[in-house]
Amino acid sequence: MSRPSKPSKHICLKATMSLTCGGQESNRKFKKLPPSEWTHLFHSVPFDISEMDALTREIDALKPKVKNMLISSQGIESMKKKILFIYLLVSLGLGYHFEDEIEESLQQSFENIDNLMVGEDDLYTVSIIFWVLRTYGHNMCSDVFKRFKMSNGEFKESLIEDKKGMLSLYEAAQLRTTTEFIMEDALRFASGHLESLAADKTCPSHISRRIQSALSLSQHWNMEILAIMEYIPFYEQEEDHNHLLLKFAKINFNLLQLHYLQELKTVTKWYKDLDLASNLPPYFKDRIVENHFLVTGFYFEPQFSRERIMLTKFFTVSLLLDDTCDRYASLPEADSLAECLERWAPNDVMQRQPDYLKYVFNFILDVFEDFERERRSEGRSYSVKATVEEFKTLVRANVDLGKWARAARIPSFEEYMDVGEVEAAVYSTMPAILMGMGHIANEEVYEWLKSRPKLVQVICTKTRLMNDMAGFEDDTSRGNVTTGVYCYMKQYGVTKKEAIRKLNEMVAYNDNILNEEFLKTIHIPRQVLKIAINFARVINVTYNEGEGYTHPEGKIKEYITSLFVNRICL
Ligand SMILES: [Mg+2]
């Protein structure tokens, strides 16, 4: 239903063109942002449901065969082979089909880990086993890497020849915790040699590509769907690849793409019907497709279609709120919006606000009401309520930060981070991601989230700092000095370069804490903890090569093209 014709369910606000303290709307200066090229494309993309059915049937036929490959063998040697096979399944995007079998098999292997590792001196095997077990939450001891060191404490030079081994060591080191110095050494050792290994003419081109890509963003810290998209063509070039497995992976990937296209049709229709352009000045970022792309980073599997649609809508609301506060609203307008959202109802002041602001307010309430209606039928209204509560803190942090920014205030780094971390929208997005995951995110999980656990806290810090570093030029050009970079520079009297180096160190340390908390937090389902890891991955993809959200024409555009437009040939 198109928004203008939809009667407001909450309030009746009279249309007025009033003066505000920030000046008349018509005189307001703001940066006009162009509409997205994607929305129309995906809205009008032809879609054939019978193709989906055909692929599903093929997958149903292949699944038992691959399951057999996974569960058939027994014994220590085959246990190791099984873990290497699980690594393949995960990397090819097939792991979720065999989740129970994988869990069971890894549990068994972990219980036998000492026997499993006796005499094993293959760098690739040890590193992959470490990677897989840690990825599934088993805290395998990193002492296992001691066998690759010499008596002087250095890693053996002979390992350098083993390209795949070195790459897997580098990947294993991405799962390190804060106290694992051997993994820090491993990272230094592997990174130090991988660059020249990739450049070596004798290195097969597909391995060289994989090394370069890992050096820019490792498999562990990349969005799963992007890592899968890279791994399938790599695996195809491996001489010993399994044909059946490769076929399965390609069909599966094509089916995932069709799911995404179907979802994109739904969300772009919703977005077009909203017709934000007729209701708002062009100050907001037009990002419905980019939002959906990033949402695939939280859950890529087909069964999460409904969750992805919901979360894409949530992202749209969050982004609009942020743009409204940061790019257009006067301070009194932003304040009034925050006050009304804190009450979750309009007040007298809102009645006198300009139409655009009333529209934003109503839009936010409407979207949340839709969420509530859906969750209520499952008896999970608490998940929406928790999201609303965190959303209110997000609004307040936006206004508080906006006040500082407009006054060009540079608070102490700690004071800034207290507000800036909330404004980074992680606390409000985490409960939103879990709103749809009724089968695992129960009230206990929401209580845990409400306590703002360390696992989530470190993602806030990471998001805030990466945002501020990547957005440094844009912020500076808008005259915004209330950012982590400036606060750090002022407090410690250092240059921009030094501040960025320090903040990057903080981000890396936070990633180690994240790994640690993932292993340590035992009373919360692993799927929920994995969402936190996935959050960090999405942040990496967003900010790895500049500020992908403000400037999505670079890497993000490439990703959207490869994931949603191009198809893998079967
Ligand atoms: Mg903001």
Image (cartoon, rainbow, N blue to C red):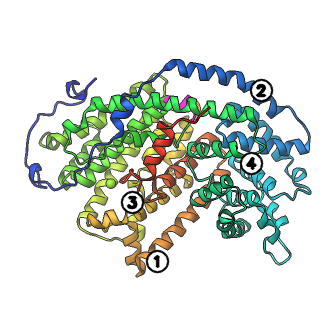
* Comes first in the chain, label 2 or label 3: 2
Residue at the disc numbered 3: 420
| Most distant residue in the front direction | 201
Q: Is residue 493 magenta?
A: no
Q: Tell me, yes or no, whether the highlighted magenta stretch contains residue 304.
A: yes
Task: Report x, y in % for residue 117.
Answer: 87, 54
As drawn, 530 above or below 176 = above
Q: Is mark 3 within 8 Å of ligand 1?
A: no
Q: Amino acid at mark 1?
A: Glu
Q: Are marks 4 and 1 in contact (CB under 8 Å)?
A: no
Number of on-image labels: 4
Q: Nearer the viewer, mark 2 or mark 1?
A: 2
Which residue is disc 1 drawn over? 498
The residue carrying mark 2 has its beta carbon less than 8 Å from ligand 1: no
Q: Which mark is residue 133?
A: 4
Q: Position of residue 536 (x, y in %)?
A: 53, 52
Q: What's the residue type where badge 4 is placed?
A: Leu
Residue at x 59%, y 34% (from the top left corner): 569
Badges 3 and 4: C-beta atoms under 8 Å apart? no
Disc 3 versus disc 1: nearer the observer? 1
* Secondary structure found at label 4: helix
Label 3 or label 4, whichever lies nearer to me, is 4
Q: Is mark 1 within 8 Å of ligand 1?
A: no
Q: Report, in whole angstroms, how far the alpha carbon at label 4 lies from the one at label 1.
A: 37 Å
Which amino acid, mark 2? Lys
Looking at the rendering, the stretch of residues picked out in magenta corresponds to 301-305
